[in-house]
Each structure stands twice: as C-alpha cells, then as structure tokens.
Amino acid sequence: MPDQGVAAAPATVQRERRLDLDRARGIAILLVVFGHIVARDVPPGVEWYEPVRYLVYRFHMPFFLYLSGTVVVLSGLLAKPPGRVVPQRAVRLLVPFFAIGLAILVAKLVAVQLVPVDNPPEGLAGGLRDLFWTTARSPATSVWYLLVLFLCTLVAMGLRRLGVGATGLVLLGVALQFADVPAVAYLDRFASHFLFFAAGLWVAEREAALLPAFDRWQALWWLAFAGGLVLAALGWVDERWSMVLCGLLCIPALHGAVRLAPISRWQWPLVLGGFSMAIYLFNTLAIGGTKAVLMKLGFGWTEAWFPLHAVAAMTAGVALPVLLKVLVLRRVPAVDRLTD
C-alpha cells in the first residue's frame, strides 16, 4: 500500500523506518489478497467463504486507512504547503488509480471473449462509466483505496488549515457514518472510511501514550475485537456499524500485536510490507489470470477444485506482483517510485 512507514522526526533529521507499521502492512496485505480470491459468486458448496470474507472486510481496509493516516502525521505531510503536496499526492495515488483501473478493464474486455470473467464490464463505454463514476458496478473495485486515500488527505489538509484538529476530524468521520452518500466516484467509500484515516491521525499525535497502552492491554483489546467480530457474524450489528465497531477495535489489537513478540521478530511481514503497493495494484490481475488459466486447463470453478483455485490465487496474488516489481518495474525509475 502507499505511504511507507517513517518515524516522527523533524525534517532535518533522517527518519528511521517504523517496522511496526511495515509489519502491520505486510500482514494486512495478505487479507486483501484473500478477499480478492472470489470477485463475485463462490462455487456452490463453498458457502463458508463469503461469511469469512465479510468478517475480514469489517476491519482490513479500515486498518489500512488507519496506517495511512498514521504515516501522514509521522511524515509531516500535513504541515507542508498544499501547493506542493497536492500535485505530489495526485501523481502518487491518482496515476496508479487510473492506470490500474484501465488495465483491469481492458484485461476483462479481452478475457471475456475467451473465458468466464467475474464482474464483466458492459463494453468499453459502460466499463469506463462504471469504473470512474457509477462505481457500485465498477469492473475494478479494488482500486478504490487510492482515490479515497487521496480525498482523505485533501480533506484533512484543508480542515487542518482551518484549525480543525485530529479530534474534530474523528468527529467528522463519525458524522459521515450517518450520511447517505451515493456510490458515485467512490464517495460512498470515502464517507464510510474517512473515520479510520482520521483515527490514524489522532493516534499518531498521541502515540507516546497510546502505543504502550496498546501493548500493555493486548488481551483486553483482542477480547473486544473478537467480540465485535462475533456481533458482526451474528448479524446483531448492521454492515456499516459493524465496520465502525470492528475497524476501530482492530487498531489497538493489531497495532499492538505487531509491536510484540513473536510477531515483532517475524521477517516475512517486512518483506511483504515493502511490496504492499505492488501487491495491492496487481493482485487482482494476477488472481484473474490464474483463475482463467486453471479453468482453461480443465480445473472448473467448482467445490472440488476450489482449494486449488484458492491456493493458486493466493500464491499468484502475492508472488506475481513481487516478481513484476523486482524484474520489470524497478528498471523504470518513474514506475518504480509509483509502485513503492
């Protein structure tokens, strides 16, 4: 994902990497790939997958927005002149948003002529409309995070310059939960996820006091987080408010966990955290291509072959973007920077 971890420090001091943020990002990106194994409908007999994915979606993207909000504060981004920051963020986030969205659309238009495709576009014109405007039907829904993160940064910068602090931004995020925002240009997702970005700002400004509390009360945080997931699984809290509940409770549970042993000694999350942007951008293309190849080879989208599809999709969704980054994208400096 965008925004690599840094330590809070003055601009004149070289910042150290925040390994807790990198590890959190590396673990969370696996949940993103898991959520993309099935784009729409699971095979008959694999009904267990959708409830599990539903629970993952209660917290994994809120946690990414939280991490991004944290890094925005730690990097000093909000204190920089908007005239300098906005163009940089537009290049950093919107260029990949449009490029990958168009790549997925074109890939689906080609693939639909050969194999069944999940969430197929309604032609080129309809696909473009749904991709960037009527986004409830987007053929590339996975790119929404980039646009929403850009909007979150702009709103936070603008309101901070008007004197609104992190607490005010959190309250705005809560208020947006009550708004009935249409699914146009992913504004509905901005409204539902700004709260978690603001929570990242709020925690980052108070982390000297909060992070030790995350560590000290891990058992309590995980009990509360698990309770939120149970309420969501039972349907006792609706879709939106279950995401608010689980998305907020996951913050001290997950952020605290990656700071403590044994996770704080794991190296593989650091590797995946370093490649999280590339994995995020290209995992759906890798998964879709892998599914198409397996079906062409005779491994149908059935209950019997779903384990094979799941393992292959998870492997391809992580490994192929990493290989693409290492073998190809790093040879083009401009593209390499956009996919870091």
Image: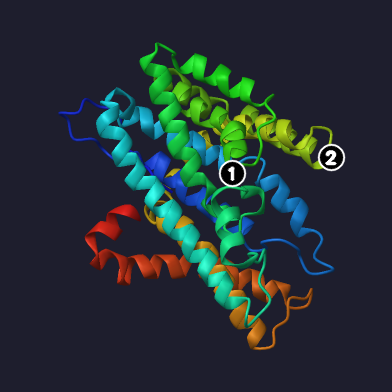
Instruction: Give the residue drawn at x 42%, y 23%.
Output: 207
| Badge 1 amino acid | His
Instruction: Give the residue drawn at x 43%, y 18%.
Output: 159
Specify the label residue 234 is tagged with. 2
Q: Earlier in the sequence, mark 1 or mark 2?
A: 1
Left/right placement of residue 268 relative to residue 141 reads left
Instruction: Give the residue drawn at x 77%, y 76%.
Output: 302
Looking at the picture, does residue 281 appear above or below residue 5? Answer: below
Q: SS class of the residue under badge 1?
A: helix
Residue 269 pos. (x, y %): 44, 52
| Badge 2 amino acid | Leu
Depth check, front residue: 273 or 41:
41
**Residue 223 placement: quadrant:** top right
Instruction: Give the residue drawn at x 84%, y 40%.
Output: 234
Residue 6 pos. (x, y %): 31, 37
Q: Are marks 1 and 2 in contact (CB under 8 Å)?
A: no
User: Does residue 135 show up?
Assistant: yes
Q: Quickly name the residue at label 1.
A: 60
Neighbourhood count class around disc 2 (C-alpha, 10 Å): few under 14, some 14–19, many 20 upward: few
Looking at the picture, does residue 3 appear above or below residue 126? Answer: above
Neighbourhood count class around disc 1 (C-alpha, 10 Å): few under 14, some 14–19, many 20 upward: many
User: Does residue 276 show up?
Assistant: no
Q: How is the image coloured?
A: rainbow
